[in-house]
């Protein structure tokens, strides 16, 4: 957990896009654009939430919903806040919101080299069910994971 500072959560807002873009650039080799993040915040089939310390966004997650299934887009923590349990709190919030929303299955792809993300997903009982060969940039495999909530 972030040293004696409470983490709160709220729904993503379009005005959050610039701060989220900075996190995207730190976390991913091909970040979502500010306009894509703005659209995500407004998408009726998306669940997108931010983690805050005070008013500062320290992480976020998003997924697209199709009936009772969710396809996780991203979960990311600001680089200077990693290693403090924020990823775990984001995942706990995601699972809680999904349950409240009637989502009972989650799916995702993760880079085979992303050991930290894989550890987080497996901590929450996600199970690998397939591999997409050379999914990322025609070079790196993606592991496909699923979770029954």
Image (cartoon, helix red, strand yellow):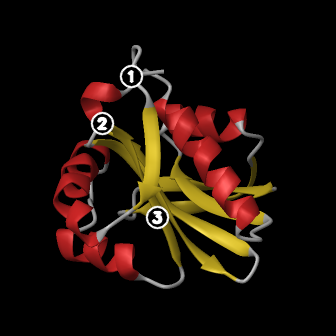
Q: In 3D space, how far apart are the residues under numbered discs 3 and 2 (Cα atoms)?
A: 19 Å
What is the secondary structure assignment of the residue under circle 1? loop
Quadrant housing residue 138: bottom left
Q: In 3D space, how far apart are the residues under numbered discs 2 and 1 (Cα atoms)?
A: 8 Å
Front tag of 1 and 3: 1
Residue in the image at 37% along x and 75% along y:
40
What is the secondary structure assignment of the residue under circle 2? loop
Reading the image, the residue beneath label 3 is 48
Residue in the image at 53% along x and 52% along y:
110
Reading the image, the residue beneath label 1 is 5
What is the secondary structure assignment of the residue under circle 3? strand
Q: Is residue 90 left or right of residue 84?
A: right
Camera-side residue: 88 or 129?
88
Q: Residue 49: x and y, percent?
A: 45, 58
Residue in the image at 48% along x and 39% along y:
114
Q: Earlier in the sequence, mark 3 or mark 2?
A: 3
Q: Residue 88: x and y, percent?
A: 57, 34
Q: What label does residue 105 carry, if any? A: none
Camera-side residue: 92 or 146?
92
Q: Residue 81: x and y, percent?
A: 32, 27
Q: In 3D space, how far apart are the residues under numbered discs 1 and 3 (Cα atoms)?
A: 22 Å
């Amino acid at each position: 957990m972030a040293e004696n500072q409470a983490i709160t959560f709220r729904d993503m807002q379009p005005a959050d896009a610039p701060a989220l873009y900075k996190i995207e650039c730190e976390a991913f080799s091909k970040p979502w654009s500010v306009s894509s993040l703005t659209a995500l915040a407004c998408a009726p089939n998306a669940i997108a939430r931010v983690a805050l310390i005070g008013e500062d966004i320290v992480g976020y997650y998003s997924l697209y919903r199709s009936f009772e299934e969710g396809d996780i887009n991203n979960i990311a923590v600001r680089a200077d806040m990693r290693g403090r349990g924020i990823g775990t709190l984001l995942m706990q919030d995601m699972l809680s919101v999904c349950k409240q929303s009637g989502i009972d299955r989650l799916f995702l792809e993760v880079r085979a080299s992303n050991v930290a993300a894989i550890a987080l997903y497996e901590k929450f009982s996600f199970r690998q069910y397939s591999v997409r060969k050379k999914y990322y940039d025609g070079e790196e495999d993606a592991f496909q994971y699923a979770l029954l909530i």
